[in-house]
Amino acid sequence: MPGDRILSLPLSVWRLAMLVLALLPLLGLAACSGADQIAGAYEATIGPAAAVKKLVLHLKPDGEGDWTVDGETVPFKWERKANALLLHAKGGGVITGTLHNDELGLELPAVGKITLRKARN
């Protein structure tokens, strides 16, 4: 019977299988916890005093996100690498930001450096 072949596997294979099964939940928690801590809405104001605009950046735990400025929303994907946050635009560009506590620093073309602060829920 097919089940007999599985039961006759060497002990080392069984130990390896049990180790993998035991570690899978831990790996899942490690992968999610960083994204869950970063996920949320970040806000900043940009532009000259006469034409200040609110920038809202949404980071979702699944690595998707979007930002909205002046009523226009642009989707992107994001990932964390150490203290850097990489925003991958659908068109292929990448913007690198730095994370520090609840602040995200970005250097935007034609805008310069901005600091977004995590919105409180």
Image (cartoon, helix red, strand yellow):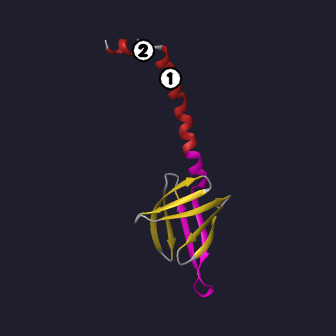
**Residue located 57% across and 40% down the image:** 29
Q: Position of residue 117 (x, y in %)?
A: 64, 66
Q: Which SS class for mark 1?
A: helix
User: Relative to the observer, which residue lies in front, 121 or 87?
Assistant: 87
Q: Is residue 63 magenta?
A: no
Q: Which residue is mark 2?
A: 9
**Residue located 55% across and 45% down the image:** 32
User: Relative to the observer, which residue lies in front, 95 or 35?
Assistant: 95
Q: Is residue 53 magenta?
A: yes
Q: Position of residue 76 (x, y in %)?
A: 46, 62
Sequence-wise, which precedes: disc 2 or disc 1? 2
Q: Is residue 118 visible?
A: no
Q: Which residue is mark 1?
A: 16
**Residue located 53% across and 78% down the image:** 110
Residue lying at the far right of the rendered structure: 101
| 67 displayed left or right of 105 | left
**What span is in magenta?**
32-58
Q: Which SS class for mark 2?
A: loop
Mark 2 → mark 1, Cα distance in angstroms: 11 Å
Quarter holding the N terminus? top left
